[in-house]
C-alpha cells in the first residue's frame, strides 16, 4: 500500500455561473504522503477538495479511486471511498461530548457510548491525539475542537484526509502538535492533503506541493527539491507587461497620515497590528498582501466602519488649513465634516450598492439625505445615473434596472462612477478590478489615474501583482495584519513583493 | 463523459436570472386558477359539484349587501395590518408581533372610550382614541425594535412573546378594573359616542385603511425614511457604508409599524366590536403576514389579497350553511390556494434543469 495512488483527479472543471473556480485540474493523492495544496485565496483549493468530499460535483472531468472511476455525490459517498475532510469551520454540537459528536450521524452504530469512548481513546493513542472523549465541546479550545473533527473522520474509517487551512486558528505550539499527528498518520499509510497558503508550513510538513493559481493547475513539485522563492513564483506567476499609463503628479501632498493603527475583530483576534503609513494626494498607493491580511479592515477603519483599538488616522484637506482626526468618528460624522472620502468596497453588492435597486436609487446612497423635505429627491441622482450610463458606457436597459442583474463589470462601473462623481480628495478602492474583463479593467485603471492627476490620494488594494507594479506609485505590503514594507513600485520586482507578502509567516498564527 | 457518470441527479435546480414582471404576474394569476382546479378534488370527494360550490362561495361573500359588508369588514383589519408590517418586512425585520401591537393599540383606544366617552365631543374623542392607539401600539413595537438594535436580540421571538403579554393585559382588564357587571368577565359595550361613524353602511375603518394604503405607498417609495428601510433590507452593510444609523432606523420603523397596528386595534374596538376582548386581534396579525407577502409588500396589491382572503373566509361559512360542505373542506381549499400562490414564486425564481440537457454557460 505504501505510496500507492489513492485518488486521482483528471481534468476537473467546476463553474459557478460565469466564474470558473477550477479549470481542468489534474492531481494525484498518494498513500503515505502529505500533499500541500498551495495557492492564494480564491485560487480554487477548497472548491477542488469539496468535490472530493461530496459537497460539490465536478462539471467536467473524472475522479479515480485506486484506479477505478468513481462518482462522489454526497459526503456519505466520500466516506465510502475513505475520504474525510476537516473543514475550516467546524461542525460540532456544543452541548455534546467529544464521543457523542464523533458518532453523530452514524446510523448503523448502536448507541453504545462506552464502546465509542474506548474506540476513540484507541485512535487517540495510536496517533498521539490528546483528547478526553467525555469532554463537552463547549469546554474545548479551538485546537481541541479540531482534534475532535479529525478523530471523527478517522473513526469513520477515513484513510484519505483533507484538512482545509488547519493551522489558521492554531498557536505555533498547537501547530507543531498537529504536524506530529499528521506525521504519525502518514507513517500509518494514510494519504493526507493540507490546504494552505503558508509557505513555512508547506516546507515543514509536506512531501509534495501542488500549486493552483486562479483556478488553474500550475504543477506539483517535491518539497525537498523546491524553496519558498520558487513556490512564490508558482503561486503568483511570471511578470506580464500590461502597459498601464503611469504619469507622475508633481505636487504630491500628505493627505492621510496613519499612525500605530491596531484593530481587533469580534472574536478578539488582531486584524491590524500597529500599522503606520502616509497616503499622498497625487499618488496611487497600492496595497498588496495575501487575502485576509487586513486589507479590508484597513479601509473600513479609515471610513469609520470598523472599531479601532488604538492609533490615529489624520486627514489633511487640500487646503491644509486643519487636520481632522478620523478615529472615533461614525461614517455619517466623517461625511458631515466635509472629509472628501470615497470608498469602493470589495463587496460591491453587499456594501457599496443596493442590488435590488436600479442605478438611480443607487446614486442616492450618497445623496439621499439632501434637501429639507422628508421626501427623496430623485432628479439629481437620475441625472447622475444618466451621466454615468453615458460616460462609462454602462450596459443596462434603464436606470431603474436592478444593478444585481447587471454584469460584474457594469456593476463596478456604477459603483466607481458614483464614488468619483462625489469629487473626493481620498479614493479608497478594494479589489476594484476583481472579476472584470480586460477592457473594463483598463477603464477602471484610467479612472483611477485620472483621479490621481487631479491630486486625489488613491489607495488601491489589489491582488494581481502585475497590476500593482504598473499602476501604483508606491506599494504597501501587508502580512498578517502588519506592514511588512513599503516599496517604490517603479523600482521593485514581483518576487520581492511576493516574498514580503509571506515573510512574516511565523507571526501569522497568533 | 459526464453523461455516463451514474447517479447524476435527474433534476437540478438553478436560480433563474430574472423574469419579465408581466410574465411573473401571469404565473401568479395562473397559480390561482390552478389552485381553484385543484380545489375541486376535495369538494368532489364530499360529493358536491365544485362549480356550484365556488358560486356559493361568491354568493356568500359578495352576493348580498349584508354579506358584502361583512366581507369588507373582514378585509379591513387584514389590509391595515399588512400595511403596518410591510415596512418591517421590507427591512427584513421579522415583526410577527402585529397581534400584540393591535391589542396594545386597542387598549389605548379603549381607555379613552371607557373613561372619557361622556366628557369629550364625538370627533375629538375618536381622534384622541386613534392617537392613543397609535402611540401605545407604536411603543409596544418599539420595545423589541430597541432590543434588536441595542443587543441584537431575536426579533421574531421577542415580538411573538410581546403578543401574549398584551393579550394577558386585556384578559386582566376584562376580569379586573374594566369588568362590567361583576362576574361577567366582560368589558361592557362602549358608549355610542365612541363608535366609528359609518359610510355606505360600513364603519369608516375602510376609508382609514384606504388612506393608509396611499400613505404607506408614499412612505415606502418616495420618502427618505422609506429609502433607508429599503437599503437596510437589502444589505445592512451598505446602509452603514452610506452613513445610516441602522439601529435608530430599526426602532423608528417599528414605531411606525406598531402605530399602524395600533390604529387597526382602534378600528376593531371602535368600529367592529364596540368593546375590547382579549382576542380582539383574533389572528389578524398572523394572517396579515400572508397578505403582505402575497402582495409582495406592494400596498395596492395587498388590497386585492386581503379581499380574496376575506371572500374565502366569508364564503366558506356560507358554503357550510347552504350545501352542508364541512367548513374543514373550505379550509382545505383555502390552504390549497395559499399553497399555490406562495409556491408559484418558486417557479418564478428557479428553473429546473433535467439531466439529459447539459447546459454549458460560458
Image (tube, coloured by chain):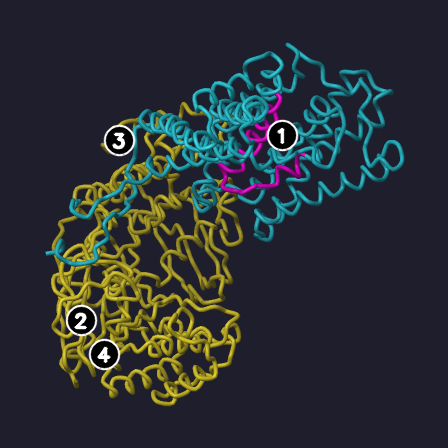
The answer for how far apart the CA atoms under marks 2 and 3 are is 42 Å
Q: Mark 3 points at which residue?
A: A396
Judge left or right: residue A466 versus residue B83. Answer: left
Query: CA–CA distance between discs 2 and 4?
Result: 14 Å
Q: Where is residue B75 in the image (x, y as percent from the top left)?
A: 58, 24
How crowded pointer 1 is (Cα within 10 Å; few <14, some 14-19, many 20+) is rated as many
Quarter location, residue A82: bottom left
Callout in the foreground (4, 3): 4
Report in which chain the residue with disc 4 lies. A
Q: Which residue is disc 4 drawn over?
A: A191
Element under disc 1:
helix
Foreground pick, B106 / A378: B106
* Pointers 1 and 2 in contact (C-beta within 8 Å): no
Which chain gets the yellow colouring? A
Which numbered disc, 2 or 3, marks the residue that appears first in the sequence? 2
Q: Distance between the residues labelled 1 and 4?
A: 64 Å
**Quarter holding the C terminus of chain B?**
top left
Which comes before the other along the chain, label 4 or label 3?
A: 4
Q: Residue A210 carries which label?
A: 2
Which dot, 1 or 2, sits closer to the camera? 1
Amino acid at each position: 500500500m505504501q505510496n500507492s495512488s489513492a485518488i486521482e483527479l483528471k481534468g476537473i472543471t467546476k463553474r459557478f455561473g460565469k466564474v470558473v473556480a477550477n479549470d481542468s485540474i489534474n492531481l494525484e493523492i498518494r498513500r503515505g504522503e502529505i500533499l500541500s495544496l498551495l495557492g492564494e485565496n480564491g485560487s480554487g483549493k477548497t472548491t477542488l477538495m469539496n468535490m472530493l468530499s461530496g459537497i460539490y460535483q465536478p462539471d467536467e472531468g473524472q475522479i479515480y479511486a485506486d484506479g477505478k472511476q468513481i462518482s462522489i455525490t454526497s459526503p456519505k459517498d466520500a466516506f465510502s471511498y475513505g475520504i474525510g475532510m476537516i473543514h475550516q469551520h467546524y461542525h460540532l454540537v456544543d452541548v455534546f461530548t467529544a464521543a457523542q459528536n464523533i458518532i453523530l450521524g452514524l446510523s448503523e452504530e448502536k448507541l453504545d457510548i462506552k464502546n465509542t469512548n474506548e474506540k476513540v481513546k484507541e485512535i487517540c493513542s495510536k496517533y498521539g491525539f490528546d483528547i478526553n472523549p467525555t469532554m463537552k465541546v463547549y469546554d474545548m479550545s479551538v485546537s481541541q475542537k479540531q482534534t475532535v473533527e479529525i478523530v471523527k473522520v478517522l473513526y469513520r474509517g477515513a484513510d484519505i484526509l483533507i484538512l482545509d487551512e488547519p493551522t489558521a486558528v492554531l498557536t505555533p505550539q498547537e501547530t507543531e502538535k498537529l504536524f506530529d499527528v499528521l506525521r504519525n498518520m502518514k507513517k500509518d499509510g494514510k494519504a493526507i492533503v493540507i490546504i494552505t497558503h503558508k509557505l513555512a508550513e508547506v516546507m515543514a510538513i509536506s512531501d509534495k506541493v501542488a500549486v493552483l493559481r486562479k483556478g488553474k493547475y500550475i504543477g506539483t513539485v517535491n518539497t525537498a527539491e523546491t524553496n519558498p522563492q520558487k513556490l512564490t513564483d508558482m503561486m503568483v506567476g511570471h511578470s506580464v507587461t500590461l502597459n498601464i499609463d503611469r504619469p507622475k503628479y508633481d505636487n504630491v501632498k500628505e493627505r492621510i497620515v496613519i499612525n500605530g493603527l491596531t484593530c481587533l475583530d469580534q472574536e478578539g483576534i488582531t486584524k491590524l497590528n500597529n500599522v503606520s503609513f502616509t497616503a499622498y494626494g497625487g499618488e496611487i498607493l497600492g496595497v498588496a498582501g495575501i487575502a485576509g491580511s487586513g486589507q479590508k479592515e484597513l479601509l473600513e477603519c479609515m471610513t469609520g466602519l470598523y472599531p479601532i483599538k488604538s492609533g490615529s488616522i489624520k486627514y489633511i484637506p487640500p487646503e491644509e488649513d486643519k487636520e481632522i482626526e478620523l478615529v472615533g468618528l461614525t461614517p455619517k460624522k466623517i461625511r458631515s465634516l466635509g472629509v472628501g472620502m470615497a470608498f469602493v468596497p470589495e463587496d460591491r453588492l453587499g456594501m457599496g450598492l443596493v442590488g435590488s435597486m436600479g442605478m438611480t436609487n443607487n446614486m442616492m446612497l450618497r445623496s439621499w439625505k439632501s434637501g429639507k423635505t422628508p421626501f427623496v429627491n430623485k432628479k439629481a441622482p437620475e441625472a447622475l445615473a444618466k451621466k454615468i450610463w453615458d460616460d462609462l458606457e454602462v450596459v443596462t436597459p434603464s436606470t431603474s434596472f436592478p444593478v444585481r442583474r447587471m454584469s460584474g463589470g457594469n456593476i463596478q462601473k456604477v459603483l466607481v462612477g458614483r464614488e468619483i462623481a462625489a469629487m473626493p480628495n481620498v479614493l479608497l478602492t478594494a479589489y476594484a478590478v476583481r472579476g472584470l474583463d480586460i477592457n473594463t479593467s483598463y477603464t477602471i485603471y484610467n479612472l483611477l489615474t485620472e483621479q490621481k492627476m487631479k491630486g486625489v490620494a488613491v489607495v488601491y488594494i489589489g491582488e494581481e501583482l502585475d497590476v500593482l507594479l504598473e499602476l501604483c506609485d508606491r506599494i504597501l505590503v501587508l502580512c498578517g495584519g502588519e506592514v511588512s514594507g513599503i516599496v517604490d513600485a517603479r523600482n521593485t520586482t514581483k518576487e520581492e513583493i511576493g516574498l514580503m507578502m509571506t515573510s512574516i509567516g511565523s507571526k501569522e498564527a497568533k | 463523459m459526464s453523461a455516463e457518470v451514474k447517479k447524476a441527479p435527474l433534476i437540478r435546480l438553478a436560480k433563474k436570472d430574472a423574469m419579465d414582471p408581466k410574465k411573473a404576474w401571469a404565473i401568479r394569476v395562473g397559480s390561482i386558477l390552478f389552485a381553484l382546479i385543484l380545489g375541486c378534488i376535495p369538494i368532489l370527494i364530499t360529493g358536491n359539484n365544485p362549480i356550484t360550490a365556488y358560486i356559493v362561495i361568491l354568493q356568500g361573500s359578495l352576493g348580498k349587501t349584508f354579506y358584502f359588508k361583512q366581507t369588507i369588514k373582514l378585509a379591513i383589519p387584514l389590509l391595515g395590518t399588512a400595511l403596518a408590517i410591510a415596512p418591517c418586512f421590507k427591512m427584513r425585520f421579522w415583526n410577527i408581533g402585529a397581534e400584540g401591537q393591535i391589542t396594545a393599540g386597542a387598549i389605548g383606544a379603549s381607555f379613552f372610550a371607557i373613561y372619557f366617552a361622556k366628557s369629550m365631543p364625538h370627533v375629538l374623542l375618536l381622534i384622541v382614541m386613534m392617537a392613543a392607539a397609535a402611540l401605545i401600539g407604536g411603543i409596544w413595537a418599539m420595545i423589541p425594535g430597541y432590543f434588536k438594535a441595542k443587543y441584537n436580540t431575536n426579533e421574531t421571538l421577542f415580538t411573538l412573546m410581546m403578543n401574549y403579554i398584551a393579550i394577558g393585559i386585556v384578559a386582566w382588564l376584562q376580569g379586573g378594573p374594566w369588568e362590567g357587571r361583576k362576574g361577567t368577565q366582560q368589558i361592557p359595550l362602549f358608549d355610542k359616542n365612541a363608535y366609528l361613524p359609518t359610510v355606505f353602511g360600513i364603519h369608516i375603518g375602510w376609508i382609514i385603511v384606504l388612506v393608509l394604503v396611499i400613505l404607506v405607498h408614499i412612505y415606502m417609495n418616495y420618502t427618505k425614511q422609506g429609502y433607508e428601510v429599503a437599503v437596510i433590507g437589502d444589505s445592512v452593510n451598505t446602509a452603514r457604508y452610506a452613513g445610516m444609523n441602522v439601529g435608530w432606523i430599526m426602532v423608528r420603523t417599528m414605531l411606525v409599524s406598531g402605530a399602524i397596528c395600533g390604529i387597526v386595534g382602534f378600528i376593531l374596538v371602535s368600529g367592529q366590536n364596540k368593546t375590547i376582548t382579549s382576542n380582539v386581534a383574533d389572528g389578524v396579525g398572523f394572517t396579515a403576514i400572508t397578505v403582505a407577502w402575497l402582495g409582495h409588500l406592494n400596498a395596492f396589491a395587498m388590497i386585492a389579497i386581503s379581499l380574496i382572503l376575506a371572500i374565502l373566509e366569508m364564503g366558506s361559512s356560507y358554503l357550510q350553511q347552504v350545501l352542508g360542505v364541512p367548513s374543514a373542506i373550505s379550509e382545505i381549499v383555502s390552504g390549497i390556494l395559499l399553497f399555490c400562490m406562495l409556491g408559484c414564486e418558486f417557479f418564478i425564481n428557479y428553473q429546473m434543469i433535467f439531466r439529459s440537457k447539459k447546459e454549458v454557460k460560458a
